[in-house]
Amino acid sequence: MPRRARAALACWLPLAGLLLVSRESRAAGPDVHLETSLDARAMELRRMPAMVLQSPYATSVRTLPSGPLSSSGPQALVGITYDAGIAVARRWMVPLFGLEFSWAVGSSPDVIEGLDGSIVHLHTWTSKMVTLLLPGFGVRAVHRRWMFDLSARGVVSVAWMTATVADGSSSLDLSDQNDSVFAATLGVRADAEVCRRLDPVERACLFVSPALYEFSALNGGSIGLRWEVGP
Amino acid sequence: MRRAWLACAAAAVLGCGSQSDTLGRFGGEQGTPIPKRAASVLVPACQLDAWQSETIASSAAKSVLGTVILLCPTMRDDGTIAPAESSAQHELAQQVSQLRTLGYAVRLAVTMADELGQPYPAQTMQSSLGSATWRAQIVANAAPFAAMADGLDLQLPPPPAGEPQDVTSLTAALAHGIGGKHLGIFAPPSLKPGDVPGADAYDLASLGPLVDRVHLLTLDYSCCNGAGPTIDPGWAVDVERTARGSTSAPVDVSYPLYGWDFGPNGASRSVSYLEAEQVAGDTHATVRRGPTGEPFYDWTDTAGGSHETWFDDATSTSWALAAWDTQTLPGDVGVVFWGLGSEDPQLWTTLAGEVMR
C-alpha cells in the first residue's frame, strides 16, 4: 500500500470510528456506554529503550552479532492516539483498546555507540513508536459540564529508529538487512483527564498520562488534548 | 467533523525530528567511560624532541600511559645494531633514564633497516634472518640495549612470506640472550593466511611462549583500498580475536596517532594532526567526520592533484577506545598509541578525563 494511502487510512479510520460511536452513544442505554476518543499529545521519554540489533549484520569486513545497544537517552516525541472504552453508570471506566503512533520532534543528537567494537550511529531524530493500548480500569466523576477521569491500563510499545554502522569509510544502514534495530515492552500507563462537555456527546479534554512502566519504571509520560465522543 | 480535522492537522503541524548541530557523544547523554587498559606510546625515534618531551611529562599523559616504547635501535644486515657508538648508546641510556624518572617503563623496539632507514630488499632480509651466525651477532649486540631498558620489542619490517621459522628463531635467540628481560614482538594485523604482507612469517603459536606481549599492528586500515580511516575499531577487535586464537600471550592493539594523505595516482603519505589541520586551513577545505568519527577532507594541490586526508583527533580516538568495552576487548588487552608527536594536542587531556578509574 502506498505511503500516502496508508497515512490517509490511518487518519480516516479513527474518524469513521468516532462518528459511528457518536451515533451509537446517542442510542445506547443509560448505564453502559461505548465511547471513543482521538488525541494529540506531547511525550517525553526519560530514557529511550536500548535498541536491539535483531539479527547478525554483515559488513564488508566482518559480521556484527545481534545484540543490544545502550540507551540513547531522553527523547521528545509527539503522537496521535485513537482509543475506545466503556463507561459504566457514569462512575466507572473500562478502557478497551487503542492505538498510538508517535514520532520524534525537535532536534535530537546523533548518538554514537559501540556494537562489538564497531561504531554505530543512532539517528535519534528518526525515533518512532507504536503503542497498543490494552484494557484497563478507571473511575470517573461528573459535575455539571465537567468530568474527571482517572485510569490505568496495560500497553505494548514498540520503538525504533534508523541506525548506521561504520564500515571503514562507508556507513551502512542497519535496517537494510533483515530486521532493523528496535525495542519492545509490555508496560503500564496511568491517565488523568479533565473534560468539558461541548454538546450531549462530545467533550474536549486535557490529559496527562505518566508512564508507570514503559521500557523502564516511571519513564516520563505525555500531556495533550483529547476529543471524546460518548454520553 | 471539523474538530476532528483540526485535531489531525494539529498533530501534523507539531513537526518532525531533526538532527541537532552538536557533535554526538559516545554513549549518549550518560556517556560511556573508556576502560582502563595497559597503555603504551611508541616514539618513532631514539630521542624525544622538545614537543614529545613536554607531552610525555604532562600529568594527562602520565595518567593514561604506563610505558614508552622508543623505535630504536636498528639491526643491520651485517649483524651490527645501530647506534653502535658508545656515545650514542650513552645518550639513549640517558633518554631511557629520564623517562623512567617520570614514572614510565621504557622498552626499546628493535627494528631492521639500512643506513638510510630504508627496509632491506626481501632477499637480503631473508638471508639475514635465516642465518644462525647473523642471529647470534644480533643477540650479542642487543645486550647493551636490553640492559638499559625494561624490555625489548622486535619490530621487523614485513619479512619475506613463508619463512615463519626465521622470525621464530630470531625471537627465540633474543629471548634466550637477554636473560630475564622482557621481550615483545610487533605482529601484522592478520585475519587469515596471506591477507597482509609478511603476516605468514609470524607463527603466533610458537612466538607466544617466547614473548611477554604481542603488539598487533592494527594500523593503516585503508592503506591499500583507497582513502579511508587509519583504523576501524571493529576490524581491530577481529584482529585481536584472531591472534588470541593462536596464542595465550598478552596482546596489545595499536592505535594510530597520525593520519594519511591519499594523493593522486595512489600516492599516499602519513601526516600529523597539526599538518593535516594546517593544510585544511590553507586550502579552506571543509573538514567532515567519517563513519568511525575520523575527520577527513578533500583538497587540491598546486599541481591540480586531488587529495583526501584522513586523520584522528581526540574525539575519534576516544570513540574508538570507548567502543572497545571490556566485553568486546578483554581488559587485559593493552593499547599501543603509535607515533607520539603526531597526535591532536588535546588527546591526552581528553583521554585522561574519560578513562575509567
Image (cartoon, rainbow, N blue to C red):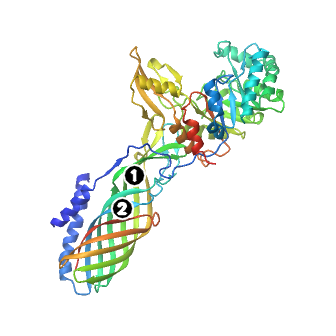
Q: Name the residue: 30% across, 79% down.
A: A148
Q: Nearer the viewer, residue B144 or B90?
A: B90
- Observer able to see residue A6: no
Residue B23 in view of the camera: yes
SS for callout 1: strand
The residue at which mark 1 appears reads as A161
Q: Chain of mark 1?
A: A
B46 above or below B32? above
The residue under label 2 is A43
The number of callouts visible is 2
The residue at the point 22 percent across, 63 percent down is: B7
Sequence-first disc among 2 and 1 = 2
Which chain contains the residue that carries disc 2? A
Label 2 neighbour load within 10 Å: few <14, some 14-19, many 20+: many
Q: Is residue B287 left or right of residue B342?
A: left
Q: Give the camera-side residue of A142 and B97.
A: B97
Q: Residue at x 50, y 32 (%)?
A: B229
For residue B45, what is the image quadrant?
top right
What SS does tag 2 mark? strand
- How crowded pointer 1 is (Cα within 10 Å; few <14, some 14-19, many 20+) is rated as many
Find residue A50 and report its horizontal and vertical position in percent. Answer: 48, 56
Examine the image and state in which quarter residue B175 appears.
Answer: top right
Three-letter amino acid code at the position of disc 2:
Met
Q: Residue B245: image x %, image y %?
A: 67, 40
Question: Of tags 2 and 1, which is closer to the observer?
Answer: 2
Q: Toward the viewer: A66 or B162?
A: A66
Horizontally, is B336 left or right of A183 in the view? right
Q: Is residue B119 above or below residue B227?
A: above
